[in-house]
Image (cartoon, rainbow, N blue to C red):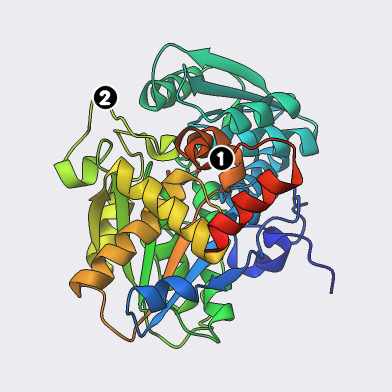
Amino acid sequence: MHYTGLVNRYRSRLPFGPEVKAVTLNEGNTPLIELVNIPRQAGFEGRILVKFEGLNPTGSFKDRGMTAAVTQAVHEGSKAIICASTGNTSAAAAAYAARAGITAFVLIPDGKIALGKLAQAVVHGAVVVQIQGNFDDGMRLVKEVAQTAPVAIVNSINPYRLQGQKTAAFEIIEALGGQAPDYHCLPVGNAGNISAYWMGYKEANGQKSTATMFGYSLEAFADGKLPKMAGYQAAGAAPFLRGGRVANPETVATAIRIGDPQSWDHAWAAQKESGGWFDECTDPEILATQRLLAETEGVWCEPASAASLCGALRDIKSGKIAQGSTVVCTLTGNGLKDPDIVIQGGLKDLIQVAAERSAVERAILAKLR
Ligand SMILES: *Cc1c(COP(=O)(O)O)cnc(C)c1O
């Protein structure tokens, strides 16, 4: 059957009746790719699989939440949506608003936004408002403005966002033959995604989730096992590690450059109930992992996404993640969104030679050894 997006695929497990028309770009249904080289090099006898969310229509997992949020907004008659964004939420909001024929207002921080993401908001015709502040300032302003202006907030404080995002857990369970992994690792910024996955895993196992406020089906289709949830933050933007809000978050992983996570309680519960943990990765570690994944497995994710694998590999090495287990890492966004970061670090590898056969041959032979 033709796949028409996650609202239609999982409608009975989402707060949408049959009468609600999905606003969709056929998001979801992303591949769960088993890593072959990295586990071997790490001496890991278990399995590491990456859920490559960078293959969603606008290149990040935000499309899962956005199809649900915009579907509901349009169903309620909204003519405009608004969000604060480090880049990917605005890209998704812009595209789904275009699809629905409504207006998207996006508040982005000044600077520190990947060029590809900004271009996406522009090309899809969003109204881009650049504020002299960071994401946390933008989030505060969006909440204030939406109190009076006729605009629907589509940040992850909108409960429909997490509803859409939880479907990634359903897909993973299906791909693993009706079973959750032993560990699920992901980057944490605003903390909506880790909350959504935990909700998805619980519901797939027939358990009521703390975030459940709608009366849809909780019929189990998994075998009862729940994963340990591990959330990794960038060291310069790690409120969960510091035990509270971080005033001036800084990291190259701009998608998780957030100091005041909106889903704090749900994310904390996910980590605690599952027997998981939070940890942090430095910028150099994050960039090295992004490069490792691209060079040894052929998968290019954006810096923030690499935090999941970065943390997982460290915890495998220390034994915190047990040998022989199945580990899933969410790769939240596509590396193509932020080529600058790679070019900055990688141009030194460029070989320049004369336009002559002998020069090119010499260059090639030197590399073949
Ligand atoms: C939004 C985003 C995150 C962080 O997800 P949260 O739900 O805010 O924790 C991580 N990586 C990428 C690429 C993102 O776009």
Image location (x, y in percent) of residue 322 = 25, 80
Tag shown at residue 248: 2
Q: Residue, x 66% and y 27% (percent of image)? A: 119
The x, y position of residue 40, in whole percent, is 40, 78
Q: Earlier in the sequence, mark 2 or mark 1?
A: 2
Viewer-side label of 2, 1: 1
Spatial separation of the CA atoms under disc 2 and disc 1: 36 Å
Identify the element where label 1 is drawn: loop
Q: Residue 178: x and y, percent?
A: 53, 85
Q: Amino acid at mark 1?
A: Leu
Kindly give the residue lying farthest to the right in the view shown.
Answer: 2
As drawn, 13 above or below 246: below
Q: Which residue is mark 1?
A: 350
Name the kind of residue labelled 2 in the image: Asn
Q: Quadrant of residue 14?
A: bottom right
Rendered residue at 70%/23% (across/down): 122
- Figure quarter occupied by ligand 1: top left
